[in-house]
Image (cartoon, helix red, strand yellow):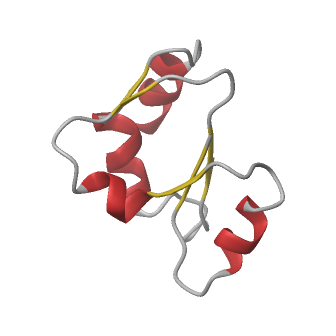
Amino acid sequence: MIFYFTGTGNSLYAAKHFDKELYSIPKEMKKESRKYTADRIGIVCPLYEFNLPSLAKDFILTSGFLSYQDHQKCRNALR
């Protein structure tokens, strides 16, 4: 399960090399409830001045990744 955010298509191109199960972060952000379960969860997005785009960061902070063991560590690192 790969979530991606792309402006030019480069991140989508890269995401396709990791998994076939792809989800657009902007589309997922429109959902009321965002809880995901998978053996592996990845996020592919560009970096803007060594930081995640705000939409990708908000997605991580406001979504639930039920099988992702380091989710809390990831959320804390983004704050």
Residues 30 and 56: in front is: 30
Query: Which percent across, then down, holds residue 21?
Result: 64, 48
Percent across and percent down for residue 67 are: 55, 14
Q: Image check: 40 left or right of 36?
A: right
Q: Is residue 34 visible?
A: yes
Furthest residue in direction front, as rendered: 20
In this image, 45 relative to 76: left or right? right
Please state if 30 lies on the left or on the right of 39 as rendered: left
Question: Between 66 and 74, which is closer to the camera in this rendering?
Answer: 66
The image quarter containing residue 44 is bottom right
In this rendering, does residue 54 appear at all?
Answer: no
Is 40 left or right of 17, judged from the image as shown? Answer: left
Q: Position of residue 8 (x, y in %)?
A: 59, 87
Residue lying furthest left in this view? 32
> Compared to 1, does 27 lie above or below?
below
Which quadrant, please, contains the C terminus? Answer: top left
Q: Quadrant of residue 68?
A: top right
- Locate the N terminus and report the quarter of the image it occupies: top right
Furthest residue toward right: 17
The residue under the point 43% across, 55% down is: 56
